[in-house]
Image: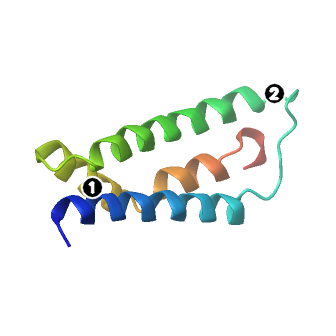
Amino acid sequence: MTTTQNAKDLCLRLEAMHEHWIRGHVTRPINPDGPEAATYIRRLEGALEWYAERVADCRKISAPGNVARSELDADGGIRARQALTDRGGDR
């Protein structure tokens, strides 16, 4: 398997793991009209933006791709778990 194919496979596995994890961890919706909704949405958006940037770069077979893959590996989903579990007033 080529390095390019390995990188593509890694990205596809990360995307599938993300979908599986979200289905298993989002258990209770917040009240969209409640005071914690805007804060919660900003946290989710921040985490998603971080992941989107890394996943876009992880497909690159170059230094930026190596950095992105390393950052995703080191994160291990921590940002997602923090964003999903920190629901403002629900602490």
Residue sitting farthest toward the left: 63
Q: Helix, strand or loop at disc 2?
A: loop
Q: Where is residue 10 in the image (x, y as percent from the top left)?
A: 34, 63
Q: State the colouring used for the structure image.
A: rainbow
Q: Residue at x 62, y 65 (%)?
A: 20
Q: Nearer the viewer, mark 2 or mark 1?
A: 1
Total numbered circles: 2
Which three-letter amino acid code belongs to the residue tagged 2? Pro
Instruction: Give the quadrant of residue 81.
Output: bottom right
- Residue at numbered disc 2: 35
Q: Where is residue 37 in the image (x, y as percent from the top left)?
A: 76, 31
Q: Where is residue 24 in the image (x, y as percent from the top left)?
A: 70, 66
* In the image, residue 84 above or below residue 53: below
Q: Helix, strand or loop at disc 1?
A: helix
Q: Where is residue 59 in the image (x, y as percent from the top left)?
A: 28, 49
Given residues 39 and 80, the one toward you in this image is: 80
Instruction: Give whichever of discs 2 and 1 has the lower sequence position.
Output: 2
Distance of label 2 from label 1 (alpha carbons): 36 Å
Instruction: Give the quadrant of residue 51.
Output: top left
Quadrant where the image shows the N terminus: bottom left
* In the image, residue 14 above or below residue 84: below
In the rendered structure, the answer to whether residue 5 lies left or right of residue 25 reads left
Q: Which residue is drawn at 47% across and 35% down?
A: 49
- Residue at numbered disc 1: 69
In the rendered structure, the answer to whether residue 11 lies left or right of residue 21 reads left
Given residues 22 and 12, the one toward you in this image is: 12
Mark 1 Cα within 10 Å, few/some/many (few <14, many 20+)? many
Residue sitting farthest toward the bottom: 1
Q: Mark 1 and mark 2 in contact (Cβ < 8 Å)? A: no
Q: Residue at x 31, y 60 (%)?
A: 74
Instruction: Give the quadrant of residue 35.
Output: top right
Which three-letter amino acid code belongs to the residue tagged 1? Arg
